[in-house]
Amino acid sequence: MSNHDYSFETQLLHNQYKFDPATGGVSVPVQYASTYHQPSVDKFGKYDYSRSLNPTREAVEEIIAGLEGGTRGFAFSSGMAAISTAFLLLSQGDHVVVTEDVYGGTFRMVSQVLTRFGIEHTFVDMTDLAAVKEAVRPNTKLFYAETPSNPLMKVTDIQAISDIAKEHGALTFVDNTFMTPYLQRPLELGADIVLHSATKFLGGHSDTVSGLAVVKDEELGNRLYSLQNAFGAVLGVQDAWLVMRGIKTLSVRMQQSQENAIKIANFLKDHPLVKKVHYPGFEDHPQYEIHKKQSYGPGAVLSFELESEQLLKDFVNNVKLPVFAVSLGAVESILSYPTKMSHAAMPAEEREKRGISGSLLRLSVGLESADDMIKDFAESLRVSSAHASHQGGIR
Ligand SMILES: *Cc1c(COP(=O)(O)O)cnc(C)c1O
């Protein structure tokens, strides 16, 4: 019986790493060795140096490959290390079409680093397929999507983008950080490389910075392996273990966080001081149908716009439960301010063009009781609006 005969929930726990064949230990051993004794001059073992291959890292790489429906996984020292290494598949003179509301770090990599190596880019609204087609040049080699996007939760049709890419002999990368393979599996929709910041939902506990990449095609896998080894931004073994530990509870965490997120999104939507809530779980979300078709749920991240920037400041000061921090995808709810956090690397006019305003907050919903969160938010909004109106911040 192969792993894939089991449901996703079961596969999270029952894979070839269920126990250590040497000892029966029900946890993958953390192998700190950087180098490995070789039997003889003529016969080398499977492992020789831990940048090239390490048994603990190998375990998380194979686990994520299985969960994404790929053939090969790669673990990196951060999400950005995974993304940047994948970009190294490009060469001077190539062109990449990138979703316009891409993660701030990816924006920085594309606009400040790749340009220095003669790799061109065009940012497009990937919800607009006509605009995507228009952006194609003879040297377009890559389409880079992130769906739902950060922080406005716009949804890109992965299959449609992959089809356009194939027509032009180009690759498609999808940053699947917000969804995880529990909710969305881009390789099954035609993508070539799935990328993750495992710092987020896969790790899930705000205690590791790590990145993953998965491919289906064997040749592409060989090329990416070669780049992982050449660039060398590999994941350390302790962090590999933490990601594996996180993955074991992925389904229950995602399920509960999503259920809580749906309740909180609905509360915010009905609140008079909230101008707009961006969440792909709403039927009036512009790409609701596409998201429903390509994923198994709306996820646990949403963003919302308050009446004013002053109200936002007061709300953040008064709210008690969520941590106010960069990052997302953890057991605790995380409230963040894209303008000064995830998208600080983006020039103000670029942010405004994309609709990321100074009164927008992003919320990654965790495992607290949704009722407690709603009570906390309601009270903070009440106190803050009294303060803001006193300051003349609200008309
Ligand atoms: C956090 C994040 C990244 C970057 O990952 P790091 O682990 O912080 O390097 C990339 N993409 C998305 C969508 C993210 O949220």
Image (spheres, grey):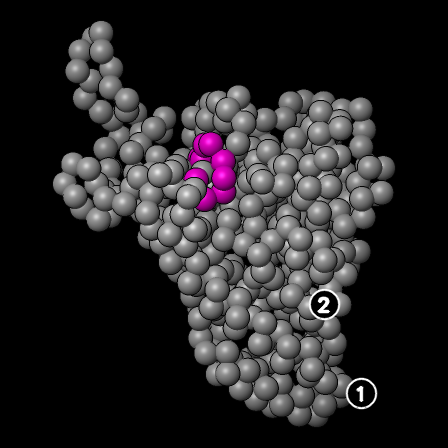
Return the residue nearer the eye: 228 or 118.
228
Residue pointed to by mark 1: 395
Task: State the residue at coordinates (59%, 26%).
Answer: 89
| Percent position of residue 173, x then y | 62, 38
Q: Quadrant of the C terminus?
A: bottom right
Badge 2 local density, few (<14 within 10 Å), some, or many (20+)? few
Q: In the rendered image, is residue 5 in sight?
A: yes
Q: Is residue 74 magenta?
A: yes
Return the residue nearer the eye: 371 or 10.
10
From the viewer's perspective, is residue 228 above or below residue 174? above
| Percent position of residue 84, x then y | 55, 36
Q: Earlier in the sequence, mark 1 or mark 2?
A: 2
Task: State the residue at coordinates (63%, 37%).
Answer: 190
Q: Secondary structure at mark 2?
A: loop
Task: State the residue at coordinates (59%, 72%).
Answer: 262
For the image, the number of numbered tags is 2
Residue pointed to by mark 2: 283
Task: State the residue at coordinates (80%, 32%).
Answer: 136
